[in-house]
Image: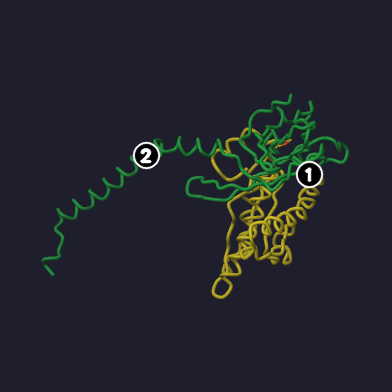
Chain colours: A yellow, B green
Amino acid sequence: MNWTANDLDLYMQQQEYIDTALIPLVHIGSGGAMKQSASSAEFLLNLCAFIERQFKGRVVLFPPFSYTDGNDKSRLASEWADSVSDMPFKHVFYLTTDPSWSREGIIADAIWIPSIPIESMDKKLKQSVLEDQVRQIIPVLTAKWTTE
Amino acid sequence: MSNTRVSRRQFLNYTLMGVGGFMASGMLMPMIRFAVDPVLEGGAAGDFIPTSQKVSELTEEPVRVDFTYDQVDGWYESEVTGTAWVYKDGDKVIALSPVCKHLGCTVNWAGDSAHPNQFFCPCHAGRYEKNGQNVAGTPPIGPLDEFDVKVEDDLLYLGATKPNTLI
Ligand code: FES
């Protein structure tokens, strides 16, 4: 499901099946890091859209949560965790290309994916690259679904 | 200075005209869209989308065929990739939609090793026979949709989806 009114209607009726929140964490870089962060965001959001399509009936893809270098990540993380825990999701997956979330243990189980610059690829290549990535993430997701 | 000054009355007039114009366009836009839309939709629904799948290479084993088309939703315009599961039944080419009839996940052929001759939905373990018939006792409530198909110069074209006609 996407974060749209219609999809959330369906979600409300089918909460027992749609039990997973998928939250993209997007870093907004400043100065020289702007373009790099845009490229990562492009990649991550493409990937998330892909995952949403594969697992439409099980996950709700949240609007990307973006933050800058000035934000206090630990605070953001705990505020998010508090709010999301008030929602009836059984599983919450954070997806990011920024390794600091899991490396620094802020969100220990955030799923980190190395960013691939897809902006200069042609459509076919872009699609197959994204597919490869999704194929690697799927076992991570299903493992979490079956263990938690 | 004084000749470029806008009096209070003029200012109000301009503003109201601006607001009025904006409101009028707000009312007109949907009306124009209603008038134009059916034509556009007719074109899109009747279209067959070409794929790169050679029909002579199809077998009785379903294979994944991807195709792309443009989609406009509000102000988002995007190129969408669609997928079909395609196989041959005798001489007939069958193309099934991969969209699960439970809650819309994407199903895979032989996605579950315990059921190698069925479509499998990873979300809630929904299953379908090869002809798209949903397996009773799994969550899906109906069979997979079917695409209209067309063959030209040995290439597969996919049309609109319709309720399954094989069952
Ligand atoms: S969405 Fe396919 S089984 Fe639930």
Residue B43 vertical placement versus B70 (above, below) = above
Which of the chains bears the disc numbered 1? B
| Real-space CA distance between mark 2 and mark 1, rounded to the nearest whole angstrom | 47 Å
Q: Is mark 1 on a helix, strand or loop?
A: helix
Question: What amino acid type should be assigned to the residue bearing mark 1?
Answer: Glu
Is A25 on the left or on the right of A113, as rendered? left
| Disc 1 target residue | B57
As drawn, the label of residue B32 is 2
Q: Nearer the viewer, mark 2 or mark 1?
A: 1
Residue A112 vertical placement versus B103 (above, below) = below
Q: Give how far across and how far down residue B18 sits, in percent.
A: 26, 50
Is A45 on the left or on the right of B44, as rendered? right
**Picture quadrant of ligand 1:** top right
Q: Nearer the viewer, residue B129 or A9?
A: B129
Q: Which of B114 and B47 is in front in this view?
A: B47
Which of the chains bears the disc numbered 2? B
Residue B6 position by quadrant: bottom left
Question: What amino acid type should be assigned to the residue bearing mark 2?
Answer: Ile
Residue lying farthest to the top in this orientation: B167
- Number of numbered discs on residues: 2
Residue lying farthest to the left in this orientation: B2
- Same-subunit check for callouts 2 and 1: yes
